[in-house]
Image (cartoon, helix red, strand yellow):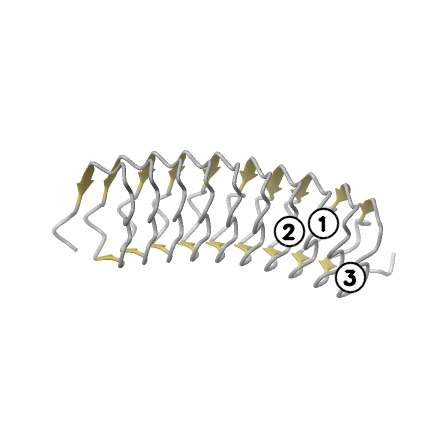
Amino acid sequence: DSVTSIGASAFSGTSLKEVTIPDFVTIIGKGAFSKCFYLTELSIPNSVLTIGDNAFYQCESLTSVSIPDSVLTIGASAFSGCKSLTTASIGKSVLTIGASAFYRCYKLTTASIGQSVESIGEKAFFSCEILTTVSIPDSVISIGDSAFSSCSSLVSVSIPDSVTSIGYRAFSSCSSLVSVSIPDSVTSIGYRAFSSCSSLVSVSIPDSVTSIGYRAFSSCSSLVSVSIPDSV
């Protein structure tokens, strides 16, 4: 009962198939279980506060993860390259989803984002190619650069009215995206934010927007209607 943290790279590159983390551990360190290629079962207890950078990086056999309500931070690249991951449930206390947290989780179909998340990091869900829907809670303030870029099966996204900025390439190359609702809290739409969204038909830009970035909607070949406010 004295172990409260799992250190950096503690089990990296091992042949573990199942991991049950005891319920007195509060920190899963950087790269703690990275490159555990055979890991299929993972249980994270409600005592964990921090999942470190690269903690489960390239755990290529892991199919699902449930992040408990105790967790406050998901580190950069924490589940990056988990190419068999199909579902991810993010607990209601998580404040930050780190950069590239679920980068290239090619089979991810469902991502449930907790109601306390304020920041979705750069490339957090980059190239999650069969992710069809995502619900962004109204706690989110910023959507990072390339956060959902190349999510080529994403059909619709609702951006809550807590968001003030949409980052560089945030939704670029989301080739199935038909509709997007931009709330009147957003003041800037980043460089290439929706570029190459080839199925996007119409977009309404609210009066709150003062800046539309370079090539923000370039190569949106189906776009036939756009409303640009006087504020721009």
**Distance between mark 2 and mark 3 Cα atoms:** 18 Å
The circle drawn on residue 79 is 2
Task: Residue at 66% x, 44% y: name it.
Answer: 68
Q: Nearer the viewer, mark 1 or mark 3?
A: 1
Alpha-carbon distance for marks 1 and 3?
A: 20 Å
Query: Please, what is the three-letter code of the amino acid marked with disc 2?
Result: Phe
Query: Residue at coordinates 61% horizontally, 57% vertically from top-left?
Result: 77
Q: Amino acid at mark 3?
A: Ser
**Circle 3 sits on which residue?**
5
Q: Disc 1 vs disc 2: Cβ atoms closer than 8 Å? A: yes
Which quarter of the figure is the C terminus placed in?
A: bottom left
Q: Is residue 71 above or below residue 157?
A: below
In the rendered image, residue 215, in percent from the top left (x then y), is placed at 27, 55
Looking at the rendered structure, the kind of residue marked 1 is Cys
Choose between 122 and 172: the one closer to the eye: 172
Camera-nearest residue between 115 and 125 = 125
Instruction: Answer few, some or many: residues within 10 Å of disc 2's Cα (few below 14, many 20 plus, some between 14 and 19).
Output: many
Location of mark 1 (residue): 59
